[in-house]
Amino acid sequence: MRKGIRIRGNGKRQCWGGARIWRVPGKAKPPICASPSCSTPLPNLRHLAIIEPLVYLTLRLRLPDALIRLPSGSRLCTRRSSSALAPGSGATIFALSSGQGRCGVAVIRTSGPASGQALRILTAPRDLPPARHASLRLLSDPRSGEPLDRALVLWFPGPKSFTGEDCVEFHVHGGPAVVSGVLQALGSVPGLRPAEAGEFTRRAFAHGKLNLTEVEGLADLIHAETEAQRRQALRQLDGELGHLCRGWAETLTKALAHVEAYIDFGEDDNLEEGVLEQADIEVRALQVALGAHLRDARRGQRLRSGAHVVVTGPPNAGKSSLVNLLSRKPVSIVSPEPGTTRDVLETPVDLAGFPVLLSDTAGLREGVGPVEQEGVRRARERLEQADLILAMLDASDLASPSSCNFLATVVASVGAQSHSDSSQRLLLVLNKSDLLSTEGPGPGPDMPPHLLLSCVTGEGLDGLLEALREELAAVCGDPSTGPPLLTRARHQHHLQGCLDALGHYKQSKDLALAAEALRVARGHLTRLTGGGGTEEILDIIFRDFCVGK
Ligand SMILES: Nc1nc2c(ncn2[C@@H]2O[C@H](COP(=O)(O)OP(=O)(O)OP(=O)(O)O)[C@@H](O)[C@H]2O)c(=O)[nH]1
Ligand SMILES: [K+]
Ligand SMILES: [Mg+2]
């Protein structure tokens, strides 16, 4: 049981960790809400510490971005640091938000206080259309009165808009002359300026419309190349990861309130028994949840950046033929001459809906010329980095020394690995099955689990794709089910930091240090969803976006 250190003021003032609570001696006057913008009276502090630990802690520690809730559950205030806005952010911004180049319809967006004025000026003499109704308007250049296009316009008065500010969308014909004419006309409206890359989304973040994980989910959705990446990004944009982190942060806030309450009232006999034990139980459960998520961390990142699948095997097994088949393009040279492939040839492929970096490699054999030997060395090096190994043999040549050696080394060594989430996975493919009928015996009973395939006839390809889908779901995590995945090193960093701080909480003998460890842990979760992120991190994240997003 930790001993409590009690810092008691002179009955009037109790200061703790910099937050000051002023108590009036005698009848404890109920404190008021910490938010400067309201003065709602709250029930007395001791009572509060137990029935509303979140509010108690908020008052005690003035958590900057916490939700201050009354027992009735109504919210008092939430706020995000406005520093998240890009520099020069008071202006109204505009940009082409649909793709560059000739297209049927192009979408030009504005966001900021002068949006309504810009819409009036470009559609003069008509007034603003009804909010959120697509309206057909003639756009004209305010400088010359020259008609620009007949467009659909949409007026989104803030805060019910993507950025939380007044927004307008111009849906114009997607010809370069129309788009540039409208952009120039907008540029001539006082108070408007072209948007920076990602600035619309950055404003949505600054106005609390998106948290940082949702911003990253939006970036991933825009960059998604495969079905699995789209599903994963959509879940993150829908806030699943942010929601999970908020739940963890609330658990920590409750545990912290219990520890603080014990520090404040530990000796009072009417403080509930087991307040500290309750905090320990909450922390232990959180450690288990965080640990499970961190073990999964690599999966989410693989899903974003692509799983490394390496094709390996003895010369002439048909490796290059398979790579060309899976990538549906002539990535590698195929020839009957063994030792054709020397360099590692990497190509991004959508395999069964998963993003994959598929590598073709030199046939593994010893005792060849220096160039091919360098190729073999590079092949082995790439094999080390593989998330999934496609091991290939010629099914009609299984008794050869090169096949036996390959089975005894590469295949056996991966099979021997203890199966954990981070260990490599291997699929054994016996190629050239079309030769089996004529060339004699196929695989014996002691052959490890394998798939038969013919790159020439395509026999067995469906089975291989199904097996690949299962393996890749295991390697990348199945984005349709299971908990939301961590998709960035930043997420992993903060979760690891949170877990480390919880470790310090458990080791600390001194309650004050234990409370501080919980605060540090909670800070990591807050930064993960974007409260209090540093400018540099925000710049890096929003740099990922194109202009107009
Ligand atoms: N009959 C038959 N021949 C195949 C099959 N797959 C590949 N081949 C032939 O086998 C020879 C070698 O194919 P590659 O794809 O170059 O083999 P590789 O493993 O990349 O060879 P190296 O790069 O030299 O290691 C070529 O002549 C292919 O046409 C198959 O399924 N059946
Ligand atoms: K070959
Ligand atoms: Mg090859």
Image (spheres, rainbow, N blue to C red):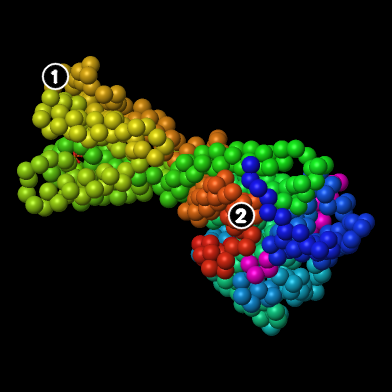
Q: Residue furthest right?
A: 27
Q: Amino acid at mark 1?
A: Gly
Q: Which residue is mark 2?
A: 513
Give, as a single range, the part of the protein colored magenta. 69-84
The quarter of the picture where the C terminus appears is: bottom right
Instruction: Inspect the magenta stretch and tell me whether residue 74 lies in it.
Output: yes
**Contact (CB < 8 A) between labels 1 and 2?**
no
Where on the image, by quarter, is ligand 3? top left
Location of residue 276 by image quarter: top right
Mark 1 or mark 2: which comes first in sequence? 1
Residue 390 or residue 270, whichever sits in front: 270
According to the image, label 1 marks what residue? 440
- Where disc 1 sits, the SS reads loop
| Residue 17 at x, y percent in the picture | 69, 62
Q: Can residue 220 be seen here? A: no
The Cα–Cα distance between marks 1 and 2, rounded to whole angstroms, is: 74 Å
Which one is nearer the viewer's eye here, 220 or 534? 534
Q: Quadrant of the N terminus?
A: top right
Q: Is residue 31 left or right of residue 433?
A: right
Residue at x-position 26% and y-position 50%:
345
Q: Name which residue lies at 76% across and 52% down.
A: 264
Of helix, strand and loop, which one carries label 2? helix
**Side of 294 relative to 367 (left or right):** right
For the residue with label 1, is its CB less than 8 Å from the closest atom of ligand 1?
A: no
Q: Quadrant of residue 80?
A: bottom right
What residue is rendered at 71% in x and 70% in y? 112
Three-letter code, disc 2: Leu
Structural crowding at the residue carrying mark 2, measured as other residues with C-alpha within 10 Å and reported as few (<14), some (14–19) or many (≥20): some
Q: Main secondary structure of the magenta part?
A: loop
Percent across and percent down for residue 393 are 20, 31
Position of 129 with respect to 306 (left or right) is: right
